Amino acid sequence: MGMPHKFGMFVHWGIYSLTGYHEQARWRFFTPRAEYRKLMNEFNPVKFDPDEWVRLAKDAGMEYICFTTKHHDGFCMFDTKYTDFNIMNTPYHRDVLKELSEACARGGLALSLYYSNPDWDYKYGFNSHSSHQMPEKGDVEDIEKLKEFQKNQIRELLTNYGKIYTFFWDIPMNIYDPSMNEFIRSLQPGILIDDRGWGDKGDFSTPERCVPDGHKFERLTEACQSVGEQSWGYCADEDYFTNRYLTASIDRIRAMDGSYLLNVGPMPDGRIPERSAEIVRRVGKWYNSVKEAFDTEPYLLENRSLVCTKRGSTLYVHIPDGLNSRGLTLKPIDVLPKSVTLLNDGRKLKYAITTRPEDKGWSAPDNILRRQTLHIFDMPADEFADETMVLRIKLDEGKIEV
Ligand code: FHN
């Protein structure tokens, strides 16, 4: 069954976008806290239009948005009583999370909340058991105080912004306290929680920037990846991923019944960079054409570079690594299908069962050349070299053995 929502937009947005560099710019530039805090006075995203974000996501076939309410820098993109380091104290003075939650509700998208465990601004935020820490002189490690602080903010997040789909803790605490997830569930029964919180595995796993081995995930899984290799937050010199790479990665994760969060990093003025938006649109066009091939069962082909899924007597052959030629033989399929369609653009493809030697008047030893294989011809391999092709092969009822 997998996660209830299958494809979503991750959004890393905060005052770090002003650096045009990275969501962890403060860490990478060794910026003192007081210096970094000054960015708050410059943050004024006057072009923030959450309905536009929602439209972009929906058109791409996405069903939810996961928003960074607070990243490691500790800056809160929501109205919180528990630190002054928040969006209400910028020249913008508006609760962007509130506006996003309303836009999601209007547009019919679910909303997930990302919340970082590391907090480089909170005096008691240091956790010597974990990574991504940036304590300053005078800070005190006090896990109980940190817990209280988090609970106060979580109460705000889970009571003021409507129904929340998932809670995405980031950077495991490496301290076991199941009461934290229990607290979340008490505020939002039915919420799904990731595996990066306070020591318990939560409801779902979160492979990041990778595609794990296998054919089917053992537990609920949501993979995440950004549109570019450099950063999750806005990066002026981003190395954007190719369409070939992103469609292959989404395809493999979805074929294993994982869901996929594709990240963008909005600019300081609130707009999603056009190149990122273009990637979302292009990937989305592909996703919308091929998505019937997911939420299926895995099926194993002899050609391991292909991914194959099935539903009833329909087989889907995914080609994430591209083709070297225009043809494909599909062992062990040896029956003539009713049709073979390239889902990417809906065209019908030519196919046949490999010629039997006896048809040529030549008798070969049993079990050597007798084997018949479905052969697909004249595929538009060059035309679709930069995206994962997915074929729909319709067979007669009962023709597939798993
Ligand atoms: O350190 C962060 C990183 O900046 C980003 O937020 C990703 C998204 O999953 N999580 C962390 C690394 O695992």
Image (cartoon, rainbow, N blue to C red):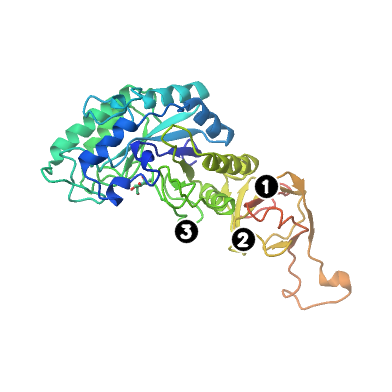
Query: Label 1, label 3: how many angstroms apart (C-alpha)?
Result: 24 Å
Q: Nearer the viewer, mark 3 or mark 2?
A: 3
Q: Secondary structure at mark 2?
A: loop
**Which residue matches tag 3?**
213
Three-letter amino acid code of the residue under disc 2: Leu
Q: Quadrant of the C terminus?
A: bottom right
* Point 82% across, 67% down: residue: 355
| Residue 127: percent from left, percent from top | 18, 46
Q: How many numbered tags mark residues here?
A: 3
User: Where is residue 330 shown, x and y percent of the image?
Assistant: 69, 61
Quadrant of the rendered image containing residue 86: top left
Any mark on residue 314, and which? Answer: 1
Q: Is residue 79 visible?
A: no
- Residue 301, numbered circle: 2
State the SS at label 1. Answer: strand
**Residue 203 at what x, y percent from top left?**
36, 41
Residues packed near mark 1 inside 10 Å, few (<14), some (14 to 19) or many (20 plus): many
Label 2 packing within 10 angstroms: few (<14), some (14-19), many (20+): some
